[in-house]
Amino acid sequence: MSKRKSIYFFLAIIFIFGLIFFRINVYVESHKLQVAFLDVGQGDAILISEGGKQILIDGGPSGQKLLEKLGEYVPFWDRKIDIVIATHPDADHITGLVDVLKNYAVDEVIESGAESQSQVFKAMEKIIEDKKIEKQIARQGMNMKISTDTELKILGPSEMDTKNSKDTNSASIVARLSFGKNSFLFTGDLPMEVETRMLKNNLFSAINILKISHHGSRFATSGQFLGITNPQDAIISVGKGNRYGHPANEVLDRLRERKINILRTDDLGDVVYGCDNIKNECKTGTINY
């Protein structure tokens, strides 16, 4: 290689690395919020991203599928998930988290406190222990400040729901994400009986976007609940042709009666909201950093 070609090659390398570092800085310094309801089949996985921070709520039923999805939304240079939230220990919510914990650096895991004898739950707990990842048990009133404008508040479970229930769904972590005038409610697989108790305790208020509980099961999402939360959009994370018949017609009818927009992952794939300003409404569509 001639001396001139060597100089051009060297300059090209510097330019490429400079461009990469520029993109990293723009990405990290950006305060735009993105909430992605990932199409992982019959399960839940929600990625909250803001600048260089990532919070993953649940992981769906397949580690391979979840890693593929994260590869679409998390930059290749970023191998860190700040917080992983396992809403409850059912396989369709935590199986994918096992591979995430293996392949990403995770600062903290938040669990409901409900336990399971399943092999996937034991595998997740072993990785958390082996990698010495900080673990917290979610409780009503916990607040996580993601940035100046963004906050994630834990509304449930209560200690009673975790200790007294043999049904892991009843101990689901319920969280509200607030960004200016925008609010998202994540419900795990919360059943109607706990939903009703939380309503009596005035834990719910009006929101913009609702993640429908338990993939649209008829045993959740009551008319009273919808009347209080009054969402504009309802996200149903569900697998195409699933054997449970989710979402139930009763739930769909309740949503249609209130003219709530229904967005299903089995029909649309990933449902992604971009939030570029606290004064504006979050809109569907990815953010270009």
Image: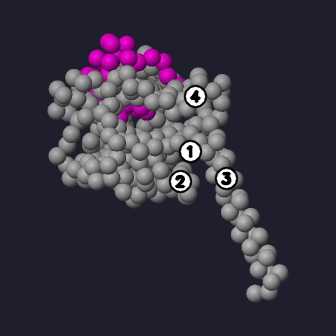
How packed mark 2 is, by other alpha carbons closer than 10 Å (few <14, some 14-19, many 20 or more), is some
Q: Residue 52 carries which label?
A: 1
**Pointer 2 and pointer 1: residues touching (CB < 8 Å)?**
yes
Cα separation between marks 4 and 1 = 14 Å
What is the three-letter code of the residue carrying label 4?
Thr
What is the three-letter code of the residue carrying label 3?
Arg
Q: Is residue 198 magenta?
A: yes
Q: Which of 123 and 58 is in front in this view?
A: 123
Cα separation between marks 3 and 4 = 22 Å
Cα separation between marks 1 and 3 = 11 Å
Q: What element carries label 4?
A: loop
Residue holding disc 3? 23
The image shows residue 161 at horizontal and vertical percentages of 23, 25
Cα separation between marks 2 and 1 = 8 Å
Q: Earlier in the sequence, mark 2 or mark 3?
A: 3
**Pointer 1 and pointer 3: residues touching (CB < 8 Å)?**
no
**Pointer 3 and pointer 4: residues touching (CB < 8 Å)?**
no
Q: Earlier in the sequence, mark 4 or mark 1?
A: 1
Residue holding disc 4? 148
Q: Nearer the viewer, residue 51 or 120?
A: 51
Residue furthest to the right in view is: 4
Q: Residue at x 72, y 66 (%)?
A: 14
The image shows residue 137 at horizontal and vertical percentages of 30, 33
Cα separation between marks 2 and 3 = 12 Å
Cα separation between marks 2 and 4 = 22 Å
What is the three-letter code of the residue carrying label 1?
Gly
Q: Which of 10 and 91 is in front in this view?
A: 10
Residue holding disc 2? 78
What is the three-letter code of the residue carrying label 2?
Asp
Q: In this view, does 73 lie above or below 161?
A: below
